[in-house]
Image (cartoon, helix red, strand yellow):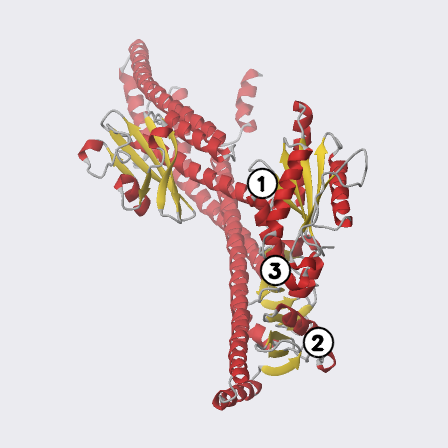
Amino acid sequence: MAKKSKLREPVRNWSLRHKILLPFFLILLLLGTVSTGSFVLLITQALQKTANDRLFACQDVIFREIKKQEILLETYTDLIGYAYLISKNDSTSESLVVQQQHLVEKLRNTDISVDFYLADSRDQIPSQSLRDLIDHAARSGQSRFRFATDIGTIPALTVAAPLPGGINPKHVLVLQTPIKPAFLRTHSSGFGVRTSLMSLSGEVISSSETGHNPPVLSRDELEEILTGKQLIRTSSTPRTIKYLFSAIPLGTSELIISVTEIPMTDLNALVNKLTVEGIATLLGFVLLGGIVYYHLLQRQIMRPVERLMHATQAVSRGNLDFHIETSASDELGQVARSFNRMTEQLKTLYSEKIDQETMLASAQEKLRFQNILSGKNRQIEKTNIELTAHVNELSALFDLIQQMLSSLDLDILFGRILQILKDVVPCDEVVLLLYNSETQKLLIRKTLGIDQDTLEGVSFGLDEGITGEVARTWEMIHLRKVHDDQRNLHYKGRNATIGSLLSIPMVVKNELLGIVNLHKNDEGGFSDREIQLVQTVTGQAAMSIENARLYNKTREMSNTDPLTQLANRRHFQDVLEKEIAEARRYSSNFSLIMIDIDHFKRYNDAHGHLQGDVVLQEVAQGLRNNIREIDLAARFGGEEFVILMTKTNKEGARAAAEKLRLAVAEKIFPGAETSQPGGKLTLSLGVAEYPEDSDNATNLLNLADQALYRAKEEGRNRTVAWNSEAPLLPYLSVRPIFKNAD
């Protein structure tokens, strides 16, 4: 039974043919699948990138062409306005008038229409949108652009410009050039895309295809586009289309939205076709390879193996005269010849001698492999040690760089950068210099290993010393002996450097940020590995410094009122809450001053909002010039300001408020003598103190505002402090400077 089991055992196992063919087919199928998938993925990415490039290229062309039309209209407006001004001032310049009329007639014979309107003759203006545009231009005194969609049958780019020389009524020049669908088709058909122009309300102004409507933008998407960003959006119903939205400014006060779109259906069909063809090709190659390989296996491998198997069976039965006929020179042929030699040796050697030789050969082979294995183990151990050291070094460098990137405070960041450089590359002194593009000077910002006071005020031009040369050429300089180079200025005699120097530029976005100098007291310089590490760290350091600068700039902009450059209301309220928390913790006090410009609406109505903005800016500058650095001035809203005076009681705040009031009252503002009561622009101020008047932020602001209101009730141009015992009665108030101030 045991013998039958042994005879049946090969039947249950796979044959050699299956063991060879199956892995071959699996490997071939796996490689084909991976290559086909990679090919389809690369084609998909390439097609997607091509579609994006076409969208962006077409959008740039549309932007430039519309701006060309805008510049053309503005140029003709300036020419006609200049001729109009000369003719108004010099009635003898008849030739110039004739040229102006000739220019107007010539423009009317083209696609550009020319019209003149009186700004206050609204009944003569054909449409509401044109009336609004002319009113806007007349009020501002500047040219104003807009797309007019209700003037003619074709949307037109329109400019309205007040003609110079008049006061009221004003003559307004209106030029229009139509933006036809053919205009958009001409500049977008070459890219295989469609183009539309939309208003901010989502209305289609013009489109390269009649009756085509792009998708409606959400409020968040519209806000993103209005910040100057370009928005890519893909629609999948009823067919896949990719859209690119971007804003195009018209003049200084209007915007339109450019929409370029490209259908992705053809691209998807191409990808599907390539996928099907790739799979079919893969299956064909697998089938063809299997047939070829099967016949090759059968002829060149399996037949010699079968002959060798019959020979071994014969020898196992005791037939030592069996001989394998073969002429092959491959491994199987060598095995066959070795088998034949073995059978010859079996005939002449005794079994004991064969056993001894076999044992000796086995021992020798084992010893040889042990020696080989020992050598390989030593080599692997050495390689592992080097790799471990390299990995540890990179890990430490990564941790240090992460620490560097974790801070947005520039002073802390500079210190971390220098410490990281000194930790990564052993050196004695490190100096960080920052480049000022306005002065074109390199200023020492941070030092390590050198007393920073020693180098205080030292700067380098682009033509001074090694540091200046590195900044000028953006190329690293490595000196193994600093005394051998005459370019070394020893920081203009402030610090006598010795040994070796490595100077590395820090460049971000093709702009020079600064220079890092590393000094070693020993000569011989820095190794290639150390230079590479320094370059890696300085590259990351440059990006970290740039990110920190951008963050600080963004934070400053978000906390600043854009008109007055004072703190905005949100930032002021944040600081006020922090100041209350600190005052509670340390039992200290502070005061608030609420400020309002008297009769500011009269000034605005008389002189216009632009001149009113100038007044707000000058008042804000006066506040900055007359408060301490630790105080915070903010624009609270409209013409109202507020000042937080740290660690100041009500009496001190009142004195400061009086100083501000007098500074503004003594200043001459253009036009105030005719529009303001008393001929001067004045302030009313209200004062409240924490915690004497209130320990709540909202209530404290309200009390200061009530004091300000009482100052206005009492005649304006005065300071009133809140009195908790007599609410809304003046406390420490002053008499007005001008007799007829109201």
x, y percentage for residue 691?
72, 29
- Identify the secondary structure beneath mark 1: loop
Task: Tell me the residue at 57%/38% (across/down).
Answer: 628
Report whether 182 appears left or right of 580. Answer: left
Q: Earlier in the sequence, mark 2 or mark 3?
A: 2
Q: Which residue is labeled 3 in the image?
A: 245
729 or 235, nearer to the observer: 729
Q: Is residue 18 above or below residue 289?
A: above
330 or 482, nearer to the observer: 482
Camera-side mark, 2 or 3: 2
Residue placed farthest to the left in the image?
484
Camera-side mark, 1 or 3: 1
- Identify the secondary structure beneath mark 3: strand
Q: Is residue 5 above or below residue 121?
A: above
Instruction: Say which amino acid is labelled 3.
Output: Phe
Residue placed farthest to the front in the image?
739
Q: Earlier in the sequence, mark 1 or mark 3?
A: 3
Report whether 308 appears left or right of 463. Answer: right
Can you see residue 597?
Answer: yes
- Tell me the distance, in whole angstroms, between the alpha carbons under discs 2 and 3: 24 Å
x, y percentage for residue 533?
36, 32
56 or 174, nearer to the observer: 174
Residue 150, numbered circle: 2
Splitting the image into 4 quarters, where does residue 174 fall?
Answer: bottom right
Mark 3 surroundings: few (<14), some (14-19) or many (≥20) residues within 10 A: many
